[in-house]
Image: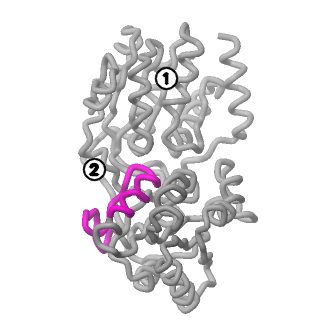
Amino acid sequence: MKAQELMEIIGADFYTGVPDSQLKALCSCLMNTWGIDPHHHIIAANEGNCAALAAGYHLATGKVPVVYMQNSGEGNIINPAASLLSDKVYAIPMLFIIGWRGEPGVHDEPQHIWQGQVTLRLLEDMDITYFVIGKETTPDEVREAMEGFRAAFAAGKDAAFVVRKGALTYDTPVVYKNGNTMVREEIIRHIAAASGEDPVVSTTGKASRELFEIRTAAGQSHKYDFLTVGSMGHSSSIALGAALAKPGQRFWCIDGDGAVLMHMGAMAVLGAYRPANLIHVVINNEAHETVGGMPTVAGTTDLVGVAKACGYPYAVRVENFEELDRELEAAKARGALTLIEAACSIGARDDLGRPTTTALENKENFMDYLAGL
């Protein structure tokens, strides 16, 4: 069904969420309808943040808000759903729209498989009634489901539309761009050259896919890299854990702005422990580019200032490759926790591939390499 039909049936005037490629049609419709508007549409840092923001909207207006997400975000809403929204606590109604990645029987990437299997079970455990929208679902069926949801909302309960792959369509594309000139794949190529044989932890999405292809094209081993294909926002914490366990070995973390925003508290922990052997590079394209390009708030966030406030001894922003190369080399010589924010354009190669090794093989190769350091 068309995304605008779904919005008309829902009838809400406030949406907040974290973008998902499976919900790209809805996200594009929202951007063309409202853009980023504090009264109608907000892209928040993580899904729990969205649920709390939507709860505040309900408290102020009495209306039922909508929170959209990929099913990986269910983990982030469990706490607010159970201890804030529940009809056994504050009885705050809201509608979730969830992209069903890893649906059983539908091919997907390894990080989505288990999440896909437990998607509906988690909703049931949280006492959230749901309706699955597929390609063949009619608007009338969605209207009927929505009427049932309204009874749940009146009782202070939550409900969810779970959206299968290809179920929503939208005809008007949205073009996302910024004024930055550096391309992410080239930024990663420069980092890979500077890091040499140091271990690298890279964030979820296209960054890890590009790092894998860069190693392949250069004839380098993939043993140096831990590709965090899922668990968005946690790469810097993984890198911190490894760096603290091996203080004599330098580590690199290739991060993204959306990931950093999703769990920004990790930077406070990094700054508190200040591992001298960790270089944290945040590639900031001000967008959730891997899932479609919708904007993050990183375009108006001073990440360097945040890092310094969190206790990083050194933090800097670079906007061209000359600055990037200079700061990468300086970070190696400095021997102190360093953040380098690299201003990045939006976009990637159309023929960008995916890792040809399994997640388990990646882990085992990386651990074997660390064991020999």
Task: Give the position of the C terminus as an image quadrant.
Answer: top right
Q: Nearer the viewer, residue 157 or 312?
A: 157
Q: Nearer the viewer, residue 249 or 247?
A: 247
Q: Is residue 80 left or right of residue 137?
A: left
Relative to 215, does residue 102 appear above or below in the rendering? below
Relative to 333, does residue 281 appear above or below in the rendering? below
Question: Residue, x 45% and y 78% (percent of image)?
Answer: 3
Q: Which residue is mark 1?
A: 252
The magenta span reads: 31-56
| Residue 97 place in picture, x, y as percent | 50, 69
- Judged by depth in the image, the label closer to the viewer, 1 or 2, is 1
Residue type, numbered disc 2: Asn
Question: Residue, x 51% and y 19% (percent of image)?
Answer: 251
| Residue 15 place in picture, x, y as percent | 37, 68
Q: Which residue is mark 2?
A: 178
Residue type, numbered disc 1: Trp
Local crowd size for mark 2, using a 10 Å CA cut-off: few (<14), some (14–19), many (≥20) = some
Residue ranking furthest to the bottom: 140
Question: Residue, x 58% and y 21% (percent of image)?
Answer: 242
Q: Nearer the viewer, residue 61 or 166?
A: 61
Tag 2 secondary structure: loop
Question: Residue, x 28% and y 62% (percent of image)?
Answer: 36
Relative to 223, does residue 7 appear above or below in the rendering? below
Tag 1 secondary structure: strand
The part of the image, by quadrant, that contains residue 315 is top left
Q: Is residue 293 visible?
A: yes
The part of the image, by quadrant, that contains residue 267 is top left
| Residue 168 place in picture, x, y as percent | 52, 75
Relative to 289, does residue 283 appear above or below in the rendering? above
131 falls in the magenta region? no
Q: Return the mark for residue 195.
A: none
Local crowd size for mark 1, using a 10 Å CA cut-off: few (<14), some (14–19), many (≥20) = many
